[in-house]
Image (cartoon, rainbow, N blue to C red):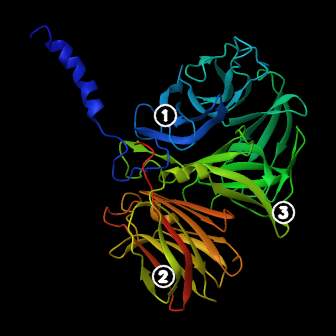
Amino acid sequence: MKKLAPLLLNLIPFLMQAQTTFYEERFRPQYHFSSQKNWINDPNGLVYHNGEYHLFYQHNPFGNIWGHMSWGHSVSKDLVKWKPLPLALKEEGGKMAFSGSVVVDTKNTSALGKKKENPPMVAVFTAHDSINQSQYLAFSNDQGRSWNSFAGNPVLDLNKRDFRDPNVFWYEQTKQWVMMVSMPIEKMISIYTSPNLKKWTFQSNFGPIGDTSGVWECPDLFQVPIAGEPNKKKWVLLISQNSSMQYYVGEFDGKKFYNENSPSKIVRPDYGSDYYAAITFKNTPDRIPVSIGWVNNWNYANEIPTDPWKGAMSIPRKLSVKKIGSEWSLVQEPIKALRAMRSMEERLSGTISVKNSYTLPFKSNCFEMEVDLKPVKNGICGIKVAVGGNRSFIIGYDSKSAQLFTDRSNTPSNFSKQFPLSAKKYASLKTQNDKVKLHIFFDKSIVEVYANNGELVFTSQVFPEETDTGIEFFSDGNDTVFEQISFWPMRSIWK
């Protein structure tokens, strides 16, 4: 027995870890991606390859706050259920692995592949230390399971402290790679091109334009179909600023992006308080980009009351654009594959007229819901979720100002001084045939609201009491009609 004791002592930590139950914690999202433990932020290197969607992400492997940035890695067959893999890119030599992208070098332009039938996956990312940010390469010849640093790093270095987040794609018309990389302080996105991912040539800058109140980072340029005209496409440029995002729609000629919306107009892919650094899978099987964003906010990201994980990813969204008036607008729809996680539908037939409040006959803190409402003139109406006591998260419509809004003022917030400061969020939204169509996802601590078939989106974090599971319709004393009410409890993607 004495000889077995050291062996047993060594096994104890592994046995304890095996008995630890993850994904059942109080605030843990059940159908939004989150790491088993420790901190995550920006999604990185979203790419589809050999039947797998690869999700890389900024990750601290050593703790539950920001630091030691490396690339976590998970794969999925359907963008719904995810399988974790070992760290892809690690902090090395005093340099963190900041955000970037991954491409499949099908033509082996980089000469980093070993076999013609097995093209390399190449990561283009920012190596960060306290005085410099430069662009590095790493490559994989085994479907992203292991990664090697490129011996010729850095491949792009301007000797700047802020120069980051390269987003790379192949532009077939010029047979070159294109890199969008941020100049954060200057509020510009620089465009470079390369024949082989190793040597980069500057082509143009975009910006400053639109929202210049914060640093510019995490750019992504991609082509999307025009809604209702699948054979026609437009280019969309996403940019993040501190704790929000904006986008531009226009054309791209391989060297320069041309914005076609009003230069003074600021439009956002998400008007909630907790959506950042979204980028896209560009090479999906149907070639329609799908975006994923980080659900958190830099103003309180380290303070949210979650353990042993911190940070989550949004529902994947299929993207298109359409003209609303004279402006191009981004349309975002939750991927249909997520419907596989629905439990039995609960449907309220007919219409429900509400003057003050109406309590729905079902409760949950993990559900999907669709409802149409006919707002009263010059009034406020909507839906409350996470209802308990005097607490609730409000999804409302103000018909006088024609604005959709979310309000988490009456939810717990004592974990942070900053969290309450972004409690209310508003955005303009016109009714369609006198209705507002709402598609709501509530997942333990995340609320995503898609309005009028993805014309407007709000994403917010909320940390309710465990008993706050009620759902209510409300109106300000005037009759509001609610109809087409469908409700689905959602199953966990981790079981």
Looking at numbered disc 2 in the image, what kind of residue is underneath it? Phe
Contact, mark 2 vs mark 3 (Cβ under 8 Å): no
Q: Nearer the viewer, residue 192 or 84?
A: 84
Looking at numbered disc 3 in the image, what kind of residue is underneath it? Ser
Residue 222 at what x, y percent from top left?
Answer: 77, 44
Kindly report which numbered mark, 2 or 3, lies closer to the viewer in this rendering. Answer: 2
Q: Which label is found at residue 474?
A: 2
Kindly report which numbered mark, 3 or 1, lies closer to the viewer in this rendering. Answer: 1
Kindly report which numbered mark, 2 or 1, lies closer to the viewer in this rendering. Answer: 1
Q: Earlier in the sequence, mark 3 or mark 1?
A: 1
Residue 7 at what x, y percent from top left?
Answer: 20, 13
**Residue 444 to residue 59: above or below:** below
Looking at numbered disc 1 in the image, what kind of residue is underneath it? Lys
Where is mark 1, residue-wise?
A: 83
Distance (Cα) linking label 2 and label 1 = 41 Å
Where is mark 3, residue-wise?
A: 262
> What residue do we see at 47% from left, 53% from top?
300
- Toward the bottom, the furthest residue is 478
